[in-house]
Image: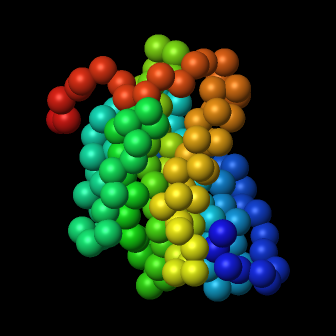
Amino acid sequence: MTGYTGAYKAGSDKRDPEGYNCGISNEEQSIVLTSYDVSARRELIDNFMRRGAKEGRVKIPRELGVGEMSDYEIRLHPYRTVGAWFRCGNKNSLITIYVRKNPARDQDHDLVQLMEIAQRRFAEMFSCKPGGPPPVEKSR
């Protein structure tokens, strides 16, 4: 999906202030990064969407929740990202995925599929049923 075929290493599962992260990287840059938060506030997805590049933004399918795909730079390396704030059981949850850009692929299609898989696995891990967007909530 990213076009990268070299050596890589998996990162740690250390807790950060916004949730859990997982990364796959080489010596130079991250190749794939994911994070999730079991119980996220609306402002987290709003902040995620504000940070992405204005050009190339695409809304995610409604059944995946509230969010979008956009271009993003980390340490001058280009990524395509997707973030989804969605209902799982009685919680409003958040998943974000960053992949190294690869112009040879339809990464929006890839990211929608990855988000579907991530939400399905998330639901299995936390014994909840994904249910699309959370109820309407105003940003703070």
Find the residue positioned furthest to the top: 90
Q: Residue at x 61, y 50 (%)?
A: 114
Return the x and y of residue 79 as percentages of the image width and height. 49, 72
Nearer-the-camera pick, 75 or 97: 97
Is 87 drawn above or below residue 94 in the view shown? above
Return the x and y of residue 69 as percentages of the image width and height. 40, 58
- What is the quadrant of the N terminus in the image? bottom right
Query: Is residue 43 visible in this depiction of the protein?
Result: yes
Q: Quadrant of residue 6?
A: bottom right
Return the x and y of residue 67 as percentages of the image width and height. 36, 45
Left or right of 77, for residue 26: right
Return the x and y of residue 29 as percentages of the image width and height. 61, 79
Q: Residue at x 25, y 58 (%)?
A: 50
Nearer-the-camera pick, 25 or 108: 108
- What is the quadrant of the C terminus in the image? top left
Is 43 drawn above or below residue 26 in the view shown? above
Q: How is the image coloured?
A: rainbow
Q: Residue at x 53, y 24 (%)?
A: 130
Q: Quadrant of residue 82?
A: bottom left
Is 88 drawn above or below residue 73 in the view shown? above
Q: Residue at x 30, y 20 (%)?
A: 135
Query: Is residue 85 visible in this depiction of the protein?
Result: no
Left or right of 48, for residue 106: right
Q: How many marks?
A: 0
Q: Quadrant of residue 43?
A: top left
